[in-house]
Image (cartoon, grey):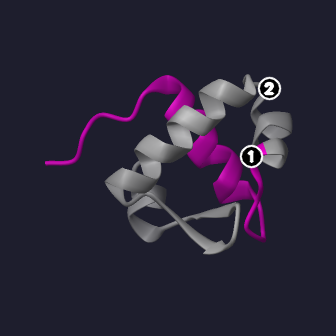
Amino acid sequence: MSPKVEAEGQKVLQALAKMATPASNKEICTETNLDTKIVTKQIKKLKDAGYLNSPVRCKYAITESGKSEI
């Protein structure tokens, strides 16, 4: 019963899946070519849904449930 991930959210998840270490908003923006505000909004939604976690302050990594949404 997971919520549908938007197209921008998919881009964020795919970008994080490619990265070996947790990434900042700026790194995600560079990888996805999305605006900072869009990335910030998507990170909040994805984190609330359990698809991302923040193992390091202000950096994000994809969770196993996030990988299954790609």
Q: Which residue is at a point 86% across and 36% down the rendered structure image?
A: 30
Using the rendered view, name the quadrant where residue 64 is placed. bottom left
Q: Nearer the viewer, residue 6 or 18?
A: 6
Q: Amino acid at mark 1?
A: Asn
Q: Where is residue 8 drawn, in percent x and y? A: 55, 27
Magenta stretch: give its range.
Answer: 1-25
51 relative position to 49: left or right: right
Q: Residue furthest front?
A: 57
User: Is residue 18 magenta-colored?
Assistant: yes
Which numbered disc flags the more N-terminal residue, 1 or 2? 1
Using the rendered view, name the quadrant where residue 5 is placed. top left
Is disc 1 placed on a helix, strand or loop?
helix
Asked whether the viewer can see residue 70, the reply is no
3 relative position to 45: left or right: left
Q: Where is residue 33 drawn, in percent x and y? A: 80, 26
Asked whether the viewer can see residue 54, the reply is yes
Mark 1 vs mark 2: in front: 1
Is disc 2 placed on a helix, strand or loop?
loop
The vertical placement of 65 against 38, above or below, is: below
Q: Which residue is mark 1?
A: 25
The vertical placement of 43 against 36, above or below, is: below
Q: Residue furthest bottom?
A: 55
Q: Which residue is at a point 73% across and 22% down the rendered structure image?
A: 35
Assess disc 2: are there few (<14), some (14-19) or many (≥20) residues with their C-alpha within 10 Å of its C-alpha: few
Q: Which residue is at a point 62% across and 41% down the rendered structure image?
A: 12
Q: Amino acid at mark 2?
A: Asn
Q: Which residue is mark 2?
A: 33
Q: Where is residue 22 drawn, in percent x and y? A: 73, 67
Using the rendered view, name the quadrant where residue 11 is placed. top right
The vertical placement of 45 against 19, above or below, is: above
User: Is residue 58 magenta-colored?
Assistant: no
54 relative position to 68: left or right: right
